[in-house]
Amino acid sequence: MTGAAGVIALGLLWVGYLHRNRRITWLQRLADRLGRVLNRPGWVALPLAMFLATILTALLGFIWDVSLHIGNGRDEGPLANPAHYFILAGLFFLFTAGMAAIVLPLDEKPGPAAVRITRTWYAPVGGILLAGAGLYALIGFPLDDMWHRIFGQDVTLWGPTHLMLIGGAGFSLIGVLLLEYEGRHNRPEPRERETRRMWLLRAFAFGGLLIGLSVFQVEYDFGVEQFRLVLQPMLIVAAATIALVAARPVLGPGGTLVVVGFAAVVRTVVAVLVGGPIIDAPRNVFPLYLGVAVVVELLALLPLVRRRIVWGAVCGLVAATVGLWLESLWVGAMFVNPWPAAMWPELLVMAVPTGIAGGVVGAMLAIVLLGEPLPRPAVRRTLVVAAVAVVAAATTNGLLIEVPEGARAAVELRDAPEQGGRMVYADIRIMPADLVGTDPEWVEILSWQGGVGSDSPGRGLVVDQLRRESPGHYVSTKPVPVHGTWKTLLRVQDGRTLTALPIFMAADPGIGAAEIPALDSFTRPFVSEITVLQRERSFDHPAWLFAVASLVVLVCSLALVAALSWGAARLNDRYLRESPTGQQERAPAQ
């Protein structure tokens, strides 16, 4: 894979070299032709066209990849998973789109904020950020391979290197919006009125940003979350406030509804492709964001909207309360795990600060895209750092778990009609009986990684929410598989208690793990859930090594956030400085 990517990269570098030395003209002609259609410079039009095609490819590959891991388990190798090709191609050409924006400008300085590379070569800020986000994501591939060799297969979306892959793609949309901003202010025909086509393209970019910031929640979309449920609403409000608070001032009335509509259509198409008869993998649902969109639209009618940052903070506050309550109706109807009433106090403690922080960040992005002055540097830096700190603190709280000592469960299994192998009903008595309250996040049996196929119930995934008979006594509501390659376990989450015990685990010679049989009657202790869900993960390493490896990923991630912040501030400062009136041309709001 590395060799193939290297050969393609050398070919693209050669094309860029020939273009910079004016030995080919077809690249410029292609870019200019697209530029005339969009009334944008070629160094904006061609990268945008490339990006739209590649990011959708990466999204399909990503959802497909997660679904395959849930249905089949770990990969036999990086080339054994067909979804990896879609992800790699999408991320590689995402990086290429950014590099195209950097390479294309020949006889011009692409705007006052352009970054000087050589004496006569200037690159647009948005192109640099787009290429940087793509490079950040691509670096995740070799780091991911190294990570798995050291720490084993952490079959979770939230593995640090996995977050690099999806984070780079998600945040690349900010680079796209900033690149389009540069193109808008360097139009070949500046007197020509902006078309509805460009308004839609901008709305779709915001929709892409909403999707990109939503991918961190995908484990919850499948119902196989490996972390506490309280993190889901926090992640929803973070994605919604950043994307929708930024979109509404730029797009105008109804803009957020178009954004969530576009995001819902794209996610639906991908969900049908992955979970339908074509690929036939485990299905997923997704947040609707309609409640937050309605909140933002209504608050935009207030005069407060002219005070962008204050308005963004208010939007974040209301989105994290009223907006999340509206979203909870959709979650309760469509998701595997609804939000119990007992979770709401902690939910609000985490979501409200996150919503305010996201609203402020979204408002500052809107200020840049509208051409209005940002707060002075010290203030805006403080706001960004505070927002990162708030999200980090909320995430850290969500990751705090407790594994009860001495807790166990007595399980009795009763055979059900076979479906490709043995299926059972379970009668479970948890000890102590007061381990779980009356309103837990979940007490369920999860069966996954049973293999995608026609004889596999639930396409390799079955989740049964157990029915409570009395304190500590639960029974299953549908049969679950205990044969083949299935991994079937009892999961409990109530507040910070997050624990599990195996019911059936197939033998796994690849990691030297013996079968845990599904006996008709047994009593087993509750253990840390991660040791059961991530059975392939290795804990045989020094603690400092894991900490250092995680720190490397954290530094890369903070560097990306810093680069995006720098780029937005540079555009705002330079374009305001060049404007005779001190006010830039605004994006049309119709």
Image (tube, grey):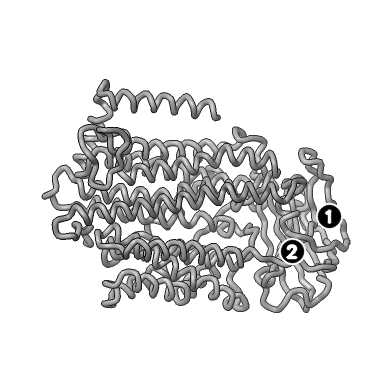
Position above or below: 180 against 305:
above
Q: How many other residues sit within 10 Å of disc 1, few (<14), some (14-19) or many (≥20)?
A: many
Q: Which comes before the other along the chain, label 1 or label 2?
A: 2
* Residue at (52, 39) in percent of width and height: 139
Q: Is residue 243 left or right of residue 471?
A: left
444 to the left or right of 394: right
Residue 238 in percent (x, y) is at 47, 64
Q: Position of residue 53 (x, y in %)?
A: 38, 41
As drawn, the label of residue 518 is 1
Instruction: Write the residue at 23% across / 53% down.
Output: 575
Residue occupying image coordinates x 29% and y 57%:
369
Q: What residue would you read off at disc 2?
A: 499
**In terms of secondary structure, where does tag 2 sit?**
strand
Indicate the amino acid at tag 1. Answer: Ala
Q: How many marks?
A: 2
Q: Quadrant of the N terminus?
A: top right
- Which structural element holds mark 1? loop
> Is residue 132 at least partly visible in the picture?
yes
Residue 210, image x and y in percent?
42, 57
Asked whether 566 or 480 is in front, the reply is 566
